[in-house]
Amino acid sequence: MNFVLVGVSHKTAPIEVREKLVIPEPKLTEALVTLKSDPCLEEGMILSTCNRVEVLVSASDIPEGIKQVKTFISNFHQLSQDFLQKFLYDFTQVDAVKHIFRVASSLDSMVLGEPQILGQVKTAFSHAQTAGTAGNGLSHLMNKAFFVAKRVRSETGIASSAVSISYAAVELAKKIFNELTGKTVLILGAGKMSELAARHLASSGISHVLVWNRTYQRALDLAEIFRGEAIRPEELFKHLERADIIISSTGANNFILNRADGERIIHRRRNRPMFIIDIAVPRDVDPEINKVNNIFLYDIDDLRNVVDANLKQRQREAQFAEEIVRQEVESFVNSTKATDLAPTIVSLRAHWESIRQQELAKSRNRLGTLTSDQEAAIDNLTQSLLNKLLHGPISELKSLSHTSEGQVHIETIKRILGLKDR
Amino acid sequence: MSLLFLRLAIALYSIGLLHSFLTIVTRKKTLFRVALFGICSGFVTHALSIVFSWIETKHLPVTNYHQALSFFAFVVVLAFLVSYLWYRLDSLSVFVFPLVFILTLAAVLIAPSQTPLPAVLKNLWFYIHIPTIFLGYAAFGIAFAASIMYLIQENELKRKRPQAFYYRLPSLEICDELGYKSLSIGFLLLTIGIAAGALWANKAWESSWEWDPKIIWTFITWLTYAVLIHYRLYAGLRGRRAAFMSILGFVFVLFTFLGTRYLVSSNHPFVER
């Protein structure tokens, strides 16, 4: 539990600084090896994305660890420490644990709840494993971080609502139709905007695309992209009723659909609902049409409002997520406490050392006068005997330290030797 | 014994009620599990209450208001559990549990009175007429809850300012489908129940109709749902208007069930006087 995390993120550094600190994937192994070459740093991993560069290590000495990581960053990028100081933050021990849990759970992301970060953290960890810089301590921590991220995702709604306009439109469509398979979308105006919106819908399972444009050839071209059907300019009203979803972005100056059209269409559709997305400015569809039963009209501002509401929703959900992180940090700290070996090893050594001293004192009188060389030789002999005897058991204990079995062994040793933690 | 189990059931239902409100407020799924457990165990206790009451009276215990309300609440829970197995809609519970709770509470508050069942009513028709009508009413209860969910979600979508319900309620399509399916099942059961009642009355009294308020209101209810289904099939009536009609239909159900006792006097033979 002597983790140190040093880094920069979108919260502390502008893009001009972050881009200087990025460690590209091909250079990652080299960087990890350099990092671990410092004797104070026992384990290490590097997370480098466009929004953050963070170095997580376990260090034998914490203040020294922070210093060494900062030196590493400045040396690796050839940037002065004075310059970096303004942007770098550092977390140690429990705070470092909490920070990496929050990062993996996307609570520290620029877009709250965005899904990519967990994958990036996983990749960063597997790089460290491949480079051989991730040991038991780091593996234990990172596996817990992945578990926390999964819990946050499944138990809170932090990632459940759309935060881009195109996805908000798809999400709204699903709130109306439940699923989009088998539904028909009609594109009015074969421009870039409508093509983009249609692509999003098509990837969500829309099965039929109709395209209408003032120039028929453009309609044909776009229809071909979606393997859809082009509608002749004069035949629009004949086909309107077939559409479950209409995406409109024509260059028209007047409304091309008004309330009366809406009422007529919905009657012909036998009241099956219709979702109209008007992304044109000036608008193509009379807002009055939203008052017709079973027609839902959203213009570009409406979609923006939905995105804003979704972001607020994510912030509310983030509070539940923070609570989960808090619980899990606590449980992680407790689990490492349980297997913390240091006190046992210290008292184990002290126990044997005091026996050695006692025995040495007892025999000393019987040995008569000795030269200082001879005294040193006896001291060395007993010392190295003790070290040899203890080496096996202690390294075995260390390798078991992250298992529950390790805890059992520690207890047994303490009981047999009557040890108390110091 | 029966009353004891009923009180236990309402205690368990109240846990379900509380937790389902919390589920909507906090959106933590773990709480819904607890709520569902409360409702399931309440359902078992409720079933025991009815079994004990059945043993005491030696017939299906629906012959006074205490028993009838308790039985009604029981079949509503049954209908909820069936639709939950089908659709897995957590949010449905929020609209069904209050109904279950109120019905059970009313049953607990009304003291049971012991009136023996007239011999004329003890036959097979009794076991066809009454359970089918009750089950039909329970299905209408689910359709009612689905219609409320539809109206709330439709309002969210029309207002374009999504709030809590937008995120927690299912899509319009699902609300509509659940509502229409429950309503169709309810209508079928009610029709069978009414037909059985008519045949039974014919046999028992050898005269067909006595137009008492209960029968009249049952017909009004039946007619409401018949009109709704007719327009759905022939004119595609759906959405907001259909939801309103389904809610109206359930108001008639409740009035037929409760109002005919307290607001207008009914001579319908199966209830206590």
Image (cartoon, coloured by chain):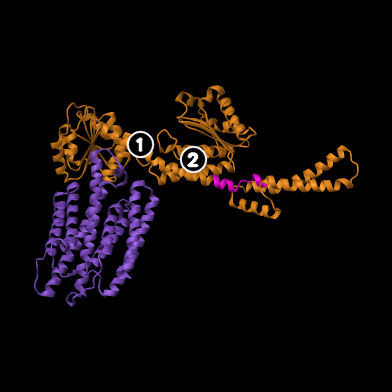
| Residue that carries the numbered disc 1 in the rendered image | A311
Magenta residues, as a range? A333-344
Q: Residues within 10 Å of mark 1 (few under 14, many from 20)?
A: many
**Which quadrant would residue B224 be assigned to in this image?**
bottom left
Q: Position of residue A343 (x, y in %)?
A: 65, 45
Residue at coordinates 63% horizontally, 35% vertically from top-left?
A61
Parent chain of label 1: A
Q: Is residue A140 visible?
A: yes
Residue at coordinates 23% horizontally, 73% vertically from top-left?
B114
Numbered disc 1: secondary structure: helix
Q: Are marks 2 and 1 on the same chain?
A: yes
Residue at coordinates 43% horizontally, 35% vertically from top-left?
A109
Given residues A226 and B10, the one toward you in this image is B10
| Drawing shade for chain B | purple
First of labels 2, 1 by sequence position: 2
Numbered disc 2: secondary structure: helix
Q: Which mark is residue A212?
A: none
**Which quadrant would residue A357 be assigned to in this image?**
top right
- Which amino acid, mark 2? Phe
| Drawing shade for chain A | orange
Q: Is residue B159 left or right of residue A412?
A: left
